[in-house]
Amino acid sequence: MEGSLDVLALGDFAWDVLIHTGAPLASGGDTFGRVELQPGGSAANVAVWARRCGARSGFVGKIGRDRFGELARENLAEEDVVPYLSETSSRPTGVVAVWVDHTGQRSMVSGQGADFLLTEADLPAELDTARHLHLTGWSMFTDPPRRAALAAARRARAAGMSISLDPASFQLIEETDPAAFVRMTAALEPTVIFPNYDEGRVLTGRSEPEEIARRLSELYPGATVALKLDAKGALVGREGRYDYVPPTPDQATDATGAGDAFAGSFLARWLAGDDLRRAAEFAVVVSGWVVARRGARPPLDARLKEHCRVSG
């Protein structure tokens, strides 16, 4: 991949242990299901989806000196994502347990692996040469990696890069304190924010999507709001003008990584010159395709390859 990167995502690479069951779990009981190991991590997912959708992308993160770390390098190489990976022996490469129930909704238990030890010293010199920096809330809830993320944002602003933020977890935002989270992340001066409905609700105290978007525009002045509404599509816009983008007819199988796919594909099209609505329409198709399949990064099929080719 030659030239500067379009998207550089910073944060977590983790391996997802996906557990699918056809019925609710019985406390203390046993059940059959499907258990799979797949690559994940919110920031890494965004980098992969941006690349799959035509952007030149890279990923900054930390892995353990272990077999899962080696596999992480191999996975990013397979996806043609430029890796900026530092290593540590203090913690293993991140692993997340993801239980997906019979409705397609997922619950996660995230171990604090090597990705939570990312420091400012791990930031690559090449960071300043990218066009866009993507950060997630997972890099904000603890320190490290918070200082590394804040330093990356300062460097990005100084270099004239655009910045995006995915708030990542409404539960952890509540634990952090929504007002404190807003103060910390608004200081990043993001160009685009990618909250889902629950994150938007917690951040704003509003319940209607357009009210959430309007309040987010006040909390993050100048930022484009791309509010992900799951099965109801998305709302996108800025400074009081928002467009509703309807969902696709895809049936939910597994919501894991769908929001990351939305963000990565949106950034790919927006940085390629699409307006906000067209980029959101493209991203809704990609995320709808993902939610109908297992895992955060299912192998592309002919349908999605055609969508990416025609839209590009």
Image (cartoon, rainbow, N blue to C red):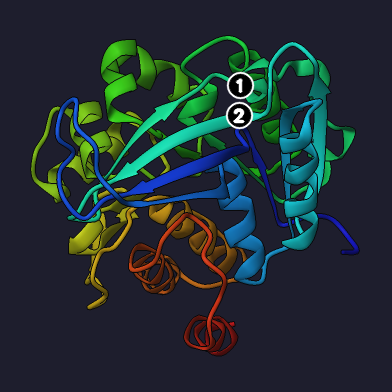
Is 113 situated left or right of 102 in this image? right
- Residue 8 visible? The answer is yes
The image position of residue 147, as x and y in percent, is 64, 14
* Quarter of the rendering containing residue 104: bottom left
State the SS at label 1.
loop
| Visible residue check, residue 164 | no
The foreground one among 18 and 211 is 18
For the residues marked 2 and 1, what is the alpha-carbon distance in whole angstroms? 4 Å
Q: Earlier in the sequence, mark 2 or mark 1?
A: 2
Secondary structure under the numbered disc 2 in the rendered image? strand
Residue drawn where x is 56% and y is 83% of the image: 305
Residue 155 lies, in percent from the top left, at: 74, 28
Q: Is residue 197 above or below residue 290?
A: above
Neighbourhood count class around disc 1 (C-alpha, 10 Å): few under 14, some 14–19, many 20 upward: many
Given the image, on which type of amino acid does mark 1 rest? Gly
Residue for badge 1:
113
Q: Quadrant of the C terminus?
A: bottom right
- The residue wearing badge 2 is 94
Residue 145 percent across, percent down from the top left: 62, 17
Q: Position of residue 150 (x, y in %)?
A: 62, 20
Q: Residue at x 65, y 25 (%)?
A: 115
Is the residue under label 1 in contact with that under label 2 (CB below 8 Å)? yes
Residue 9 in the image: above or below residue 111: below
Quadrant of res 233: bottom left
Residue toward you, 50 or 62: 62
